[in-house]
Amino acid sequence: MKRILQIIFCILSVSAAYGSIVNAAAAETESLKSPDGRLQADFILDDGVPYYTLTRDGSPVIGKSRFGMKLSDSGLYDWFEIFNVETSCFDETWKPVWGEEAEIRNHYNEMAITLRQTSSDRRMVLRFRLFDDGLGFRYEFPDHGNLIYFVITDELTEFAMTGDHTAWWIPGDYDTQEYDYTESRLSEIRGLLGGAISDNLSQTIFSETGVQTALQLKTDDGLYINLHEAALVNYPAMHLELDDSKMVFKAHLTPDPNGDLAYMQTPCVTPWRTIIVSDDARDILASRITLNLNEPCKIDDTSWIHPYKYVGVWWEMITGKSSWSYTNDLRSVHIDTDDLSKVQPNGTHGATTDNVKKYIDFAAEHGFDGVLVEGWNVGWEDWFGNMKEYVFDFVTPYPDFDVDGIQKYAAEKGVKMIMHHETSGSPRNYERHLDTAYTFMKEHGYDAVKSGYVGNIIPKGNNHYNQWMVNHYLYAVEKAADYRIMVNAHEAVRPTGLCRTWPNLISNESARGTEYQGTNGSKTFHVTVLPFTRLIGGPMDYTPGIFEMDISKVNPNNHTHANFTLANQLGIYVVMSSPLQMAADLPENYEKFMDAFQFIKDVALDWEKSIYLEAEPGEYVTVARKAKGTGQWFVGNVTGKKPYTSRIRFDFLDPGKEYVATIYSDTPQTDYRTNPQSYSIRQVRCTSESTLIQDTAEAGGYAISFREAGPQDRKLKRLK
Ligand code: NOJ
Ligand code: CA
C-alpha cells in the first residue's frame, strides 16, 4: 500500500513538475522541476535548434545554452523536431561500499526528450535529471537505423553564465591537473592564462580561456555553481572554453592524435554534464549528484574492498633524500635482469629491504594497514634516461629488494604491502603486462596498487584525457576487480563518480597533491579549494601528514618550504575524505611529535554520516564525520588564504551524553612560514549543546576526536 501511494505521489509530482509551452516565436519549451520545486530546467527548441536554461526560485542560474554535436560527416545540432517527451521520477536510497555516508538518497525528476532531425531522420535523446541540488543531463544516441558508427568532432554544449562570476580554476590542459588554483573573475581568465601561455609556463595548455572541471563559481548574489561531469566512460574528458565576450562556457573535449574527439557506436550515451547549485557553499560539498548519476556497483562481492591507512617509502624520494632508481650508471641499465650483480648501485636507492622493514615496523607499531614502496622494480633509470615504451615489466625487483622476504616479514607483523606500478605514461606496455603484474601481486600478498602515468603518453600524440586513455584507466580498474585488487591511480583522468560502480577504485590523485609541497610549495588556500573542485568526482590520495615543513631537514640539498601548519595537516584527514589515506612523512619526523601523530592513528577512513559545518572556497572548510562501525565523531578544519575564527556547535553529538573532545589546533604563535609546527592539544568536556570558537592560521586548521566522557574526566574543563 505504501509503495502504491509512493508511486501515485511520484506520478502526481512529475505531472505537476512538467509542462509544455509553445510560445509565439514558435519556440517549444518543455519544463521540469526539481522534487522540491525550487529548480527548474527548461528545454527549448528554437527554430529546430535545442537549448536549455536552469533557474532557481525563478532566477536564472544558467542562461539559454545550446546543445549539439558536430560529426565528421554531418551535424546533430539543428533541424530538430520534438519526437517524444517522457517524464518520470526516481527516489531510492543506496549504500555505498565506502564513503562519506552509509546511505545516499538518489531523488530526482527526469525528462527525456527524443529529438528527430528532419533533414536526416536521425534521433538524439536529451535526458535531464533534476535533483534538489542540481541538474545532470546527457546525450543519448539510440540504436536507430540512420545512425550507427559516428565520430564526434565537436560537442557544442554550452553553460551560459549570468554574469562575470568569481571562479576557482586551473588551466584547461590535455595532460595534467597538477596546478595551483587561481581565484579570479571570469573576465580575468584570459589575461592570467594568456600571460602564462606567453611565458611558456606550459606547452600543453590549449587555450587562453580554457579551464578544467570541476569548476567552482560564485555569483555576486552569493550563488555557488559547480560544473563538472559524471560517469566519464568511453568518451573524452570535457574541459570548458569561455567566450568572455558573452560569459558562455562551451564544452571542449580532449582530442585524439587525429584531432577527433570520440568514436561512437549506437546505442551509446555521453557522460552526464552536471550543474550543482546552492546559495550555501556547504551544499556543494554535501551534494551526491555525481555519485548518483553513476551506475550502481558492478562488483557482486565487495567484501575484499577495505579502507587503507598507509605509510610508504615515498616522501624520501619526492624530497630527493633517496632515489627510485638503483644505479646512476645509464650505460648499465639495459641490463639482463638475471645479471643485476654487474650493475653499480648508486647508494641512495630508497626501496631497500632494510629500509622497507623499518617502515613495516613503524606501520605495525602504530596500527597502519599498509606500506607502499616505490622504486622497487627495475626500469627507473631507463625511464628517466630514455623515455621509451618498454620501461617496466612490473614484476622484476631490484637486487636489494627481497620480494619474498618482505612479504613474509610484513605478514608476520600484520601489515599489507601496497604495490606501485609507474606505467611511465605507456598504457600499451602496461596493458600487455597487466595480467602478469596483477598475478604477481596476488602471489606476493598485495591487494592494492598505486599506479601512475607520469610523462607524455606513448604512443606519441595521445594525451592523458582522450577517449582512448579514459578507456584505459577504466580497463585497468575493471581488470583489477577480476583479481580482487584495489586501485589508486595517479595522473589518471579526474574522477567523475565511477567509484560508485567500481568501488575498488579507492582513490585517485588527478590534482596537485602534497608532492608539490616537497618540491615547489603550493598556494596556502589549496586544500580549501580542492573539496569544491577535484573532490566533487571522488576521493583523492592527497598524501597529507607532513610534520617537517623545512624540507632541507629531510634533504639538505632541497630548500623547499612546505606551505601549511601542522594542525592543517591533521584537519585534512577529516576534510578530504578518502578510504585511502597516507601518513606521508618519514617515521623520524613523526617520532618528534607523537602526541599530534595520535590523531592520524585515531582518525577513521569510512563514514556513516558527514555534516559540513562551515565552508567557503579559498577560505575554510569544517566538517564533522561519524565513523562507520565505531560511531566515533571527528571534526576537521582547513583554513586558506587568511586566518579564521571557526564557530561550530556540537549539535551533531548525541543529546544528553557527555563527551571528551581532544582538540589539535594552531596556536596564536602559529605561522605557516616561520612557525608551522606550533600546535596545541587540549581536552575539554562537552555535550551536543557546546559551542567551539577556534582561531586558525593562514594555511592552518584544526582536528578534533571525540569519545564518551567517564568519571576520570571530571577534572577537565567543560565547554559551554
Ligand atoms: C607521480 C606521483 O604523483 C607520485 O606520487 C609518484 O611518486 C611519482 N609519480 C613516481 O611514480
Ligand atoms: Ca602526480
Image (cartoon, rainbow, N blue to C red):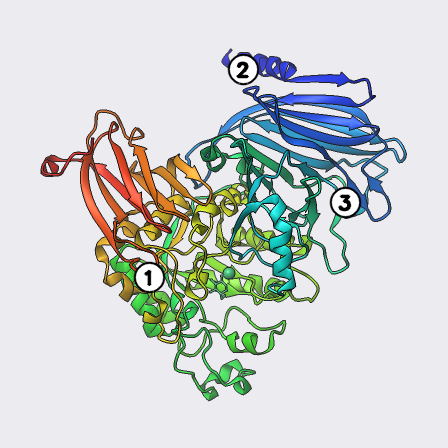
Residue at position x 71%, y 37% in the image = 139
Residue 208 screen position, x and y as percent: 67, 54
Q: Residue at x 57, y 67 (%)?
A: 424
Q: In the displayed structure, would residue 441 be above or below residue 682?
A: below
Q: Which residue is mark 1?
A: 411
Q: Quadrant of residue 399?
A: bottom left
Residue 57 % position (x, y): 57, 21
Q: Is residue 335 above or below residue 139?
A: below
Residue to which mark 3 is pinned: 265
Q: Earlier in the sequence, mark 3 or mark 1?
A: 3
Circle 3 — which element? strand
Helix, strand or loop for disc 1 = helix
Which residue corresponds to mark 2?
A: 6
What amino acid is labelled 2 in the image? Gln
Q: Out of 503 and 328, give the one closest to the viewer.
A: 328
> How much space separates mark 3 and mark 1, taking CA atoms?
48 Å
Q: Are marks 2 and 1 in contact (CB under 8 Å)?
A: no
Spatial distance from mark 3 to mark 2, Cα to Cα?
Answer: 38 Å
Badge 3: residue crowd in 10 Å (few <14, some 14–19, many ≥20): some
Residue 664 in picture, x, y percent from top left: 26, 47
